């Protein structure tokens, strides 16, 4: 598969590597691999980057179209960045960031439920702390896939976490509120109260439905919409990294909401640029 000519491979793999869950994911400077669910079966998906190309496949073998669709979603390859870039060229904060990385895209997740679990666990903790807790979660409740590269673990399903209950989740080191929130999300998934297909197409509905769940506030909802639902306008104005990046560009915290409203409806692409700017 041909990559966009300005695709930011190094940053994408760096972002994914910092959040990779051992057993579930494998990331190095050339590839991203992970366990995925196709229908009722588990597979190992792997995408390999080589200059302007991305090769992809699954083990056990699955339809090539399925692997291609996963790759295009995971690496945001179908995003039309031009409307965002056109807006950003006229913006004091975004213009220099977009000039530096014009092809920056969002590293997405295939499963909105997984995105929700990651977001809940990631509330008010560092990326490293969240990764430690997520690793315990996957190692305790993940289903084993034996592939050609050895055993790997699937991300726990909603049924897995509902069956675990908040007490077993709390024993992983999760605060009680987060454990309760995970069970609440899992229960709603089982009952069909969370129709991810409907939420993917309606950002306002997604925000309302997610924030009705105890333990999910604006940051968590925004993260789910950003990585799990692909909402191009999802924004995290209370995220400490985004606040730090904006303050470094002489934007006071009290002014962030009003100022970033100018970036609608493309604020989701700005998130990647602001987080990437933190490493500079």
Image: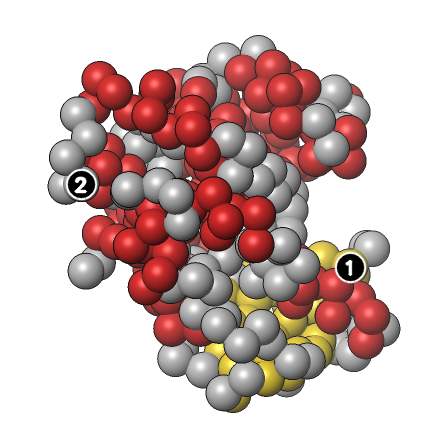
Figure check: 246 above or below 10? above
User: Horizontal placement of 203 versus 267: left or right?
Assistant: right
Q: How is the image coloured?
A: secondary structure
Q: Which mark is residue 249?
A: 2
The spot of residue 267 in percent (x, y) is 47, 37
Label 1 SS: strand
Q: Give the residue drawn at x 50%, y 26%.
A: 221
Q: Which residue is mark 1?
A: 38
Figure check: 236 above or below 215? below
Q: Give the residue drawn at x 71%, y 76%.
A: 58
Occupied quadrant, residue 219 = top left
Q: Give the residue drawn at x 51%, y 62%.
A: 24
Q: Mark 2 or 1, which is nearer the eye?
A: 2
Along the line of sight, the residue nearer the viewer: 256 or 21: 256
Mark 2 closeness class: few <14, some 14–19, many ≥20 residues within 10 Å: few
Along the line of sight, the residue nearer the viewer: 94 or 75: 94
The spot of residue 227 in percent (x, y) is 53, 44
Along the line of sight, the residue nearer the viewer: 32 or 144: 32
């Amino acid at each position: 598969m041909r990559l966009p000519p300005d695709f930011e491979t190094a940053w994408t793999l760096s972002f994914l590597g910092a959040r990779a869950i051992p057993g579930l994911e494998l990331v190095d400077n050339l590839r991203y691999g992970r366990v995925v669910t196709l229908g009722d079966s588990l597979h190992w998906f792997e995408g390999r980057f080589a200059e302007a190309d991305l090769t992809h496949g699954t083990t056990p073998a699955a339809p090539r179209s399925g692997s291609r669709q996963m790759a295009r979603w995971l690496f945001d390859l179908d995003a039309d960045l031009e409307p965002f870039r056109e807006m950003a060229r006229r913006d004091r904060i975004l213009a220099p960031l977009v000039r530096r990385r014009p092809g920056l895209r969002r590293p997405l997740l295939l499963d909105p439920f997984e995105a929700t679990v990651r977001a809940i666990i990631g509330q008010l903790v560092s990326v490293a702390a969240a990764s430690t807790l997520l690793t315990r979660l996957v190692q305790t409740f993940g289903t084993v896939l034996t592939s050609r590269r050895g055993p790997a673990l699937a991300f726990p399903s909603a049924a897995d976490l509902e069956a675990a209950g908040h007490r077993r989740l709390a024993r992983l080191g999760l605060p009680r509120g987060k454990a309760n929130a995970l069970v609440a999300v899992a229960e709603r998934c089982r009952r069909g109260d969370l129709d991810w297909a409907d939420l993917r197409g309606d950002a306002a509905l997604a925000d309302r439905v997610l924030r009705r769940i105890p333990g999910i506030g604006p940051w968590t909802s925004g993260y789910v919409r950003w990585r799990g639902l692909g909402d191009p306008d999802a924004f995290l104005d209370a995220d400490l990294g985004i606040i730090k990046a904006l303050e470094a560009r002489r934007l006071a915290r009290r002014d962030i909401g009003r100022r970033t409203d100018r970036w609608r409806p493309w604020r989701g692409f700005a998130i990647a640029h602001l987080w990437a700017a933190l490493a500079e």
